[in-house]
Each structure stands twice: as structure tokens, then as C-alpha cells.
Image (spheres, grey):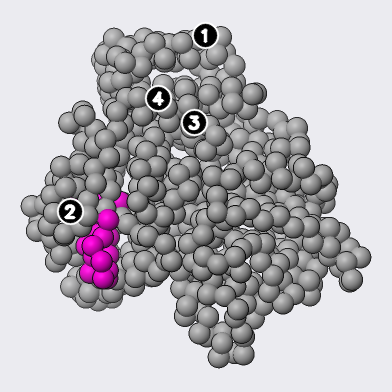
Amino acid sequence: MCGIYFSSKPYTEAVFRKKLARTNFRGPDYTGFEQVHTGAEGAGKTVAFGHNRLSIIDLDARANQPFHYMELTLVLNGEIYNFKSIREALIKKGYAFTTTSDTEVLAAAYHCWGKACLAHLNGMYAFVIYDARTSSIFAARDRLGKKPFFYRFADNTLEVASQPSQIAIGNQFETSTDAINQFLIFRYVPEPNTIYKEVKKLLAGHCLTYQLDSADLVIEKYWELPAASATFKGTYQEAISELEGLFSSAVALRMIADVPLGCFLSGGIDSSLIAAIAMKNSSEKLKTFSIKFEEEAFDESRFATDTANYLGTDHQNIPCQLNDGIQLISDFATYYDEPFGDSSAIPSMLLSKVTKQHVTVALSGDGGDEAFLGYNHFDFIHNAKILYKTPQVIRKVAAEIIRTVPYYKMKTLANYLRLADMDDFTKKIFELNPQVLSKKWSDKGYYDFIFAQKDAHYLQKAADYNTKLWLVNDSNVKVDRASMSASLEVRSPFLDYRIIEFARTLPVEFRYQPGNKKRILKDLLYQYVPKELVDRPKRGFTMPFEVWFRKELKDYVLDTLTTENLKRIPDLNLPYVQEGIQKHMKGENNFYPTIWNLLVLINWMNKKND
């Protein structure tokens, strides 16, 4: 886990250094900077490479970056988990190595296979390679977008960074109104867009090639979810057995580190399974960590403690109180860099901050709900299916009647009734509140290819949408920025692409039954821990902002969300928002997600102008 930087655009060395200093927290162990002269005998352009290193594999200075390997120069953010097996394969082909790092293995893999090296990689990564043989740049982002990759291509120059504010230094960029609209709807700015008009995200599972001589830029997709027709042919028990093998491999690969390692443990299905398998693979007592809230409705620490006691881990509950939340809110824009409205980022930052005091790498259960149909909205989608068998004309009449009921949830139901079909309903699940905008919202076809799969199960479509939209743009961003704020590396076995692909091939009924979400994961987990320890309704990982905004944080909310500040937000439906805030304070509705979104956006705008 590190921060990378590359540029073919000339800046002074002072500006380059400032860009690297902006993300020192991503890699505090070593900062490397180098300008490389390209072309025959250095007669071409001069490009710059920068790297902030968090040392995980091969702690020796020999593995520092920018890294040179034969005719290659590269910077890497992330980990190539299967680097040992790739290394062995390359040694058989005659390649030699001077370090024990995965960085050198990546360089040799590219030297050997070119862009086809991506098919060999199992990891989380964003990297940039200069190839002197072809005077070209090759760069890629991992299949599921676990690591960030921001770039600007303008005036025939290319600039790449781990965070957009690095690219903004030394430039005058314009905030994108479209991006603000998207943020207010989704709670994040979906790829490939960013908050700046001039900067883009490289899509997950994509790579790019940039020819330095001609300035040609080509972006290609190298990975996609398996086709809907790919279906597991074995029995349910055979699926459990194969899944256990994949998990054991995924966890074992992610436990390779030259620094102390632990595990997040909420006591839920996903983290308990990861901790149980990690304990099985560990020769030492595993350190586990969870968040503890004073508000019982939000607190899962007692469940985590029970599971930790059963597994025999060295467990620590980390208290999260109001003052912690306020402090982290003030630092939020620095680390997240773009407006980001998932409030669970705050406890994630706190969890990472305290965990880093004990370990440098932590395993997490992120990704299980997407691939194995674990979110509560899968029940919502399943229950709504019968609704959309009723003709739309009848549903529209019912909607007009329901809208007259003076209760905000009934108005939400009325909006759902008016939708055309299940596909539209599924898309709406992932939107926060379109009414927050003063103009009509259009989803602009985000990932419509998912809904073009005519043979796919409606819950599989929802799972795919979850993966391609929510996981990449929300969950992975949250984990990356929260962990990097504390210089902690977080590894997610559920996001091993082999598990994602395997889950995608399983029949829906293996993963979901009404009242039994994540069926196959539960049955696998019950082989490790008693059912009664983990069998309970799912809770979201968030802070009690709904309550705090009405009480302890009320003055902070009202002082920030003034009419003057709200008017700074383009296309905002000001009367609707102000009414929503007032009703929330009176306890008449739950407007906290929108309030949090607006607080984040205004704080980002203030930070940008500092």
C-alpha cells in the first residue's frame, strides 16, 4: 500500500516534491523521486516518477521505488499476492532476482509477457511502467478497483496519481457540476469521473498504453465479470467444498507479509469467516480488532468479543465516541480528497488508526455482501418482484393515492410504484435521494450493460450492479482512504478475483433464500464456529449520526448548512433540503444521509479553497 505518481508534463522539482508530500500518509517509510530521460540515449522526453512507500514485503532499501529492472522503471501501489508463484515461473524462464519483493516480480512479469502479465496477477494494484525498449508507458488498475488510479491526459501529456489533489497542484482545475450532481445522488463520484472536470479515474479492470513519441493514449479493458451463462454444475456440498478451498488460498496469500498482521472482526458472517480461516493458517495468536459504540443499537462489539473468545484471538474493542467523530470529520477532506458520503468511513478511519498501533496489515471481510447477496436490499428487491407483475398503469394510480399520506416513507413507496420494471427498481435502490436536486436526474446509463443480460436472474443483476457500482466506487474507496489515513494496509480475501468469479457462477439459490441471505457462506462458517454466535440480523457499519445530528451535533450541522453555504452548491433543491433538515431536527423524518452528504460537500469546498 503506497502512493504512486507519474508525469510526462514538466514541472519544477519543487512542484513535484509538493505533489509527493501531499500523500506522505499513504507511504511514510520512504519517498522516492526520479526524473528519467527517455528515447535513444536520453534524447526524448523527460518523465517523472514518484513513490511514497509503506514497506510490507522486503523491507530493505533495495526494494524502494521508483524501481529499475533491466529496461524498465516502475512505481506500484498495492500488493501482488501471488508473487512467489509468478517468481518461480519466471526463474524457470531464466529471469534472475536481486530482491524478495513483489515489485521486482511485477517488473519481470511485464518484461516477459508484456500487457499479458495482467492475466497472471492476483492482487490489488495500480502501477505505471516505463519501457525503454518501446519508449512507452504501460499502466493498469486491478480488476475490482481496490487501488485508486487518477489521471489527466491533456496537451499530449499524461499525469497519474493515487489522489486527485496531487494532479491539481500546479494546475487550475474546474469543479465538475455533473460530478457534484452524481455525488448528491450516489454519495460518491462514480468512475471514470472525478470532482474535477480535467481529471479522470482509470476504470477498474482496465489498462492504458501511452506512446511517449506520438503521445497516443489507448485504454483497454482486460477483465470483466463472467458471463451470465457460466453456471456451477456441481452439488451444493461440492460448492461449499470448492469455496472453502478458494477462501483458504485467498487468506493464505494475504497473510504473506514481513510486518505484523491482524484482522478486523465485527462478529458478523464475513469477518468471522476470515478470522477463523486466518487462525487456522496462523502459527501465532491472531490479533483482532472491532469498534465499540456507546449507543447499543449501533454496537456489535459484544458479538465480536464472543466470536474472538471462541476462536481464541487476541481481541481489542476500540471505543468510538462523539469527540472521535468530530475530530475525524475535520480531517475527512484531506484523506478522501473527493466528496465521499458514506458515513461508515468515520468508524473505518478510527478502526484503522488504532489497529495501526498494533499491526501494519489487517485482513477485512469487505466484498462478501456483494458477491454472496448479503445486503438487506436483496430482500427488498426480492419482495418487490411480485409488485412489478402488476401493470404499471395500475401502480401509477395506487401511487397517486399513497402520495396523499403525510408520511415520508409512503412518498418513497409511491415513487417506486411509478417505475417501469424491476431493472429500474434495482437502479433506484442505489440512489440516495434524487429530490435533492432542483432539476430532473438522469442516471445516464450507468452500467446498463448489466441489465442487458436477458438470461440473468434479477438478483444476480442486482449483485452485479452492487459490484460494479457500489463496491468499486464506495466500499473500496472507503477502505483505501480510511486505511491509508493511518498508513495501514487492508487486505480483503473476499475480493480475490477467483472468489468473485466463482460466486458469480453459483446458482442464486446457493447464495440466497428468502430469510437466509449468504446461505453458502453461513454453512461454510458453521464448520468453524457455532451457529448461535453469528446467526442474527445484519447491521450496517455506521455511526449514530441520526441521533447526534439532533442532539450533540445539532449546532455544528446548522452552523455549517446555512442558507449561504447551501446556495454554493449547484442545482440544489434548497427549499426541499431546508425542509428536510428542519423535519430531521424535530424527529419527523430521517434525513441524516442527505445531511451528512451536504456536510461532506461543503467541508470539501472549504478545504479546496484553503
Q: Earlier in the sequence, mark 2 or mark 1?
A: 2
Residue furthest to the right = 43
> Helix, strand or loop at disc 2?
helix
Label whose residue precedes the other's in the sequence (4 or 2): 2
Kindly identify the amino acid type of the residue bearing the numbered disc 2.
Ala
Q: Secondary structure at mark 1?
A: helix
Is residue 432 rendered to the left or right of residue 532? Answer: right
492 sits left or right of 280 in the view:
right
- Image-quadrant location for residue 334: top right
Question: Residue 240: x, y in percent?
Answer: 22, 70
- Residue under the image location 61 percent in, 84 percent down: 96
- Element under disc 4: helix
Q: Real-space Cα distance between discs 1 and 3?
A: 24 Å
Find residue 382 and report its horizontal and vertical position in percent.
Answer: 25, 46
Q: Amino acid at mark 1?
A: Thr
Sort mark 2 into few (<14), some (14-19) or many (20+) by Cα contacts within 10 Å.
many
Disc 3, disc 4: CB below 8 Å? no
Where are the magenta residues, as a range? 264-287
**Residue bearing mark 4:** 326
- For marks 3 and 4 on the same chain, the one whose residue lies earlier in the sequence: 4
Residue carrying label 1:
563
Q: Earlier in the sequence, mark 1 or mark 3?
A: 3
Say whether marks 4 and 1 touch (CB < 8 Å): no
Which residue type does callout 3 highlight? Asp
Labels 1, 3: front one: 3
- Which residue is identified by label 2? 308
Q: Which residue is mark 3?
A: 331
